[in-house]
Image (cartoon, grey):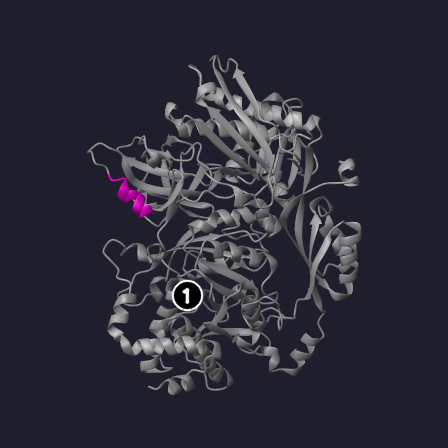
Amino acid sequence: MSLFALKCRVPLRCSRLVRLTSIYSRLYETTRLSIRRSSSHTITQHDTGIQYVRNIGIIAHVDAGKTTTTEQMLYNCGALNRAGHVDQGDTVTDFLPMERERGITIQSAAITFNWPPKERLEPNSQPHTINLIDTPGHVDFRFEVERCMPVLDGAICVIDGVEGVEAHTERVWASAQEFKVPRIIYVNKLDRDGASFKKSVQDIGLKLGGMPLVCQIPWWGKDSVKGVVDVISRSVVSWGGTKDTPEELLKMVPEGTIKDEIEHAREKLIEQLCEEDDELLEMFTAEGKDISAAAIKKSIRRIINKGDGSLIPIFAGASFKNIGVAALLDAVKDYLPSPSDRPELEVRIGRTHQPLSQVLNSAKPSKKHQPHVEALASVFKVSHDPRRGMLTFVRVYHGVVRKNIQMWNANLQLFERPLNMMQISAARTIEIPHLSPGQIGAITGLKTARTGDTLVVFAPSKAPQTELATIQVRPPDIPPAVAFIVLDAFTPTGSRALETALENLSREDPSLRWSQDEKTEQYTLSGMGTLHLEVARDRLEKHYKAEAEWGSIAVDYKECLTTPTPLRRVVFDKVIAGKPGKAACSVIIEPLSDDYRETLSGSYLERDGNIIKIVCVGEHLIADIEHTKQQLTNGVLSALARGPRRSSPMQKCFITVTYDTATDLFDSSPSSHLVGAANKAVREALKEAHQQQNIGILEPVMKVTIVCPEVSAGAVQHDLHAVRGGHVLEVKDVEDTEAREGNIINVSDIYAPPDLYEFQTTLRETRKGRLRMLEITARVPFVEMLDYDTLLRGKTQGRHTLTMALDTFEKVIGPREKAL
């Protein structure tokens, strides 16, 4: 076939012709057999079982339909006799009382099921095990999404077919992009008035930075979607009001307009794949546009497994009516990768990051009884169960984790022993004997493990005296708190029960922090926002039965240093827990500049917006250097928890602790005294800085996105700027997707099938008569936004959406500082 014939068969964009010309020439230099051999993945005996595992999550903006989609998945696979509904409060994954009361997902819920069921299984095939995590969509629970993201091998991003790509969708998409998680998109709610599959597809390309790959198109009825048609197989894959039985899957699409649109969509899909996949391009040169469905599916799987989001497969449906959900599960099976298909895990060992296989190979024992790694798992969630106690959710990366085997917590440097292993079906549990590689499950009996910890099984079961004992898998980055609430126990007995409840709650959600004032004995609980703290209070009262007097939610201000402190050396000589001892160290504290990362060198720890650097002079004289550094770090962290001006946490500080063995190492220096020395040095340095008026106050500033009618936009902008002290960054038309600056995707290059209203005059006129909506983006101090949603209802008559996320902490100056 000539290059001219190739260009005629698939009308590719001019910007790609040079690349395709070189690819075409290379195809004649290398035989097709050698290309297939070099690009194929050989399934070995070792990963035969793991290839049938899918660890996936559902991510989206709030109210996009994630939980409803999950319920319909469970119904289609046979796990439920009837799908639950969010409005009726009978869903499986949203099982907390407050979730059912508010109709939103508050905590991520894990559930395991098999797909496809027996009646849909093809001959000589077996069902896939799907470990699915339903994540929250509200921005206050973003950390709940962030801590689940690293353990996923794939994700389904659900988009509201009426609203398109919303603000929080872009945030969770960026998180998945950071971890290179393969993704597909499911456009939901196409049965609702005003739904637009075409607008949603264009939104995906323009806002998410990838080229949409339309794999399914909705089949419109008189006034709504009546089914879903698969572009690749040219057949109907879902009908409204059915469970999509195999007989219905065989029904072919009738002749007419939609038949022509399917062929056009298939050509566009092949064209986009050929630009990214050399193997499919080779097949195209041999077979033309009639490439088999199996070859196209393999090509899509290869492309999205890169995790770069360059091509985004899009599927259609309406979960409330069970349209397209079974086909979405088929897409999970066909396109999203198994754990064995993903790139190798990188772990931190000592101060370096290395591939797991390299660490395991280098750590092979030279002697018979030398410890080696038998299994490795990462904790991504901890949840309290009333009957079983703390459930520790883990993802196994290496080996087999069995119950009653001793496990080393590499973060806390101690051993724990699990009692039971289980698979979780939301609120229900199923006990299992072990967790295999790639599996997700829960463990009971761990007393201290929390989110981000790494669990290691050594054989023989003792921790090695090497860096192997410090191996860690991606510890999470916990964002700083922006709001707090004060609570006070009624009795001393209630105080002890409250402390236990707060400790368990902070283990469940590390983005919740608590402390007790030494003078007033009141407790302070800090979190990510108003809703976050309201949910925490509800859980403390109803789940943990903690009784306390509660204050009102307030802004969590921080304190900062404005000028560097001089070098301060302290000697800590005190009896602690009946043990006398003596320790010393020197401290310098400096304010962090905006470009501090460019000037830092050596090893350091970044925690809660501060940088801690431990310098040990004469390391060869210290028996356990890593333990010494950890104890000094603990002392610094405890001192930074309360600043000298308002007792607020310190932030944007660069602390350098120097431990010189010539002057600071004494004969009796218990580890607790190292903590006390570092704590005392930092506290004294900060106290002196406060006396010299060198301590400032920082307040959280939020990035606010408000979508409201055009008639209300002027009043909202004026209020944000003149009354709230904010800065409006951008105002844009929600419907204006034709021209967006800085986008690498041109809307004219995006293929999107026409919508129902483009064929029907009455619907088109109704759509043109809709309210024009504007999207306002601004930066506003959080203290001004605490009850702003209520105020907005009066300005917009309830026709608005409001989302906020922490942008930065800024110094408070002028009258605002005096008021504080």
**Residue located 37% across and 65% down the image:** 302
Q: Quadrant of residue 568?
A: top right
Q: Quadrant of residue 743?
A: bottom right
Compared to 303, does 650 lie above or below? above
Q: Which residue is mark 1?
A: 331
Residue range highlighted in magenta: 356-364
Q: Mark 1: which secondary structure?
A: helix
The image quadrant where one finds the N terminus is: bottom left
Compared to 679, does 760 lie above or below? below
- Left or right: 27 as drawn, with respect to 546: left
For the stretch drawn in magenta, the main secondary structure is helix
Q: Position of residue 157 (x, y in %)?
A: 50, 60
Q: Position of residue 462 (x, y in %)?
A: 30, 30
Q: Position of residue 143 (x, y in %)?
A: 54, 46
The image quadrant where one finds the C terminus is: top right
Answer yes or no: is residue 638 visible. yes
387 and 654: which is toward the camera: 654
247 and 560: which is toward the camera: 560
On whether residue 359 falls in the magenta region, the answer is: yes
At label 1, which amino acid type do we have?
Ala
Q: Quadrant of residue 624?
A: top left
Q: Position of residue 99 (x, y in %)?
A: 57, 48
- Left or right: 181 as drawn, with respect to 722: left
Compared to 104, does 525 lie above or below? above
